[in-house]
Image (tube, rainbow, N blue to C red):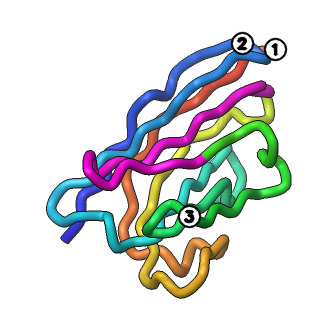
Amino acid sequence: QVQLVESGGGLVQAGDSLRLSCAASGRTLSSANMGWFRQAPGKEREFVAAISWSGGRTYYADSVKDRFTISRDNIKNTVYLQMNGLKPEDTAVYYCAADRSTAVLHSNRDEYRYWGRGTQVTVSS
């Protein structure tokens, strides 16, 4: 069993930056591909970014490419999402998740087995 806990969310202004963290316990994440998703009120949970178990491969949604950076520290068992140039449309609850496999980087949330409870990010205009 894996427990994932997100942190780092908050209320910021448009153009600001935030760094989200996802800390894992119960089992090492060093062999798992990881992803970040987000869900705005009244909308489906959507893919944001994914990273391979080694950190060597990353994959981003078009809406965040060139603004967000996913990274990981396998020694600390933590995954990060650096968010720059935040926009009001980035407002959502952000979730981290552990993929079921390591073969490819998935954007489909059904491919992810373990989920955190989320952290709120609010961007004011």
Instruction: Work out which quarter of the rendered image holds the C terminus and state it.
Output: top right
The stretch drawn in magenta includes residue 101: no
Can you tell which quarter of the image residue 3 is in? bottom left
The spot of residue 94 in percent (x, y) is: 54, 44
The spot of residue 91 in percent (x, y) is: 68, 33
Residue for point 58% across, 25% down: 18
22 to the left or right of 33: left
Q: Secondary structure at mark 3?
A: loop
The CA span between labels 1 and 2 is: 6 Å
Q: Which region of the structure is painted magenta? A: 70-87
Q: Amino acid at mark 1?
A: Ser
Q: Which mark is residue 13?
A: 2
Label 1, on which residue? 125
Determine whether 31 is above or below 48 in the image. below
Label 3, on which residue? 56
User: Nearer the viewer's eye, disc 3 or disc 2?
Assistant: 3
Determine whether 116 is above or below 41 in the image. below
The spot of residue 82 in percent (x, y) is: 59, 35
Residue for point 78% across, 17% down: 15
Residue for point 71% across, 53% down: 43
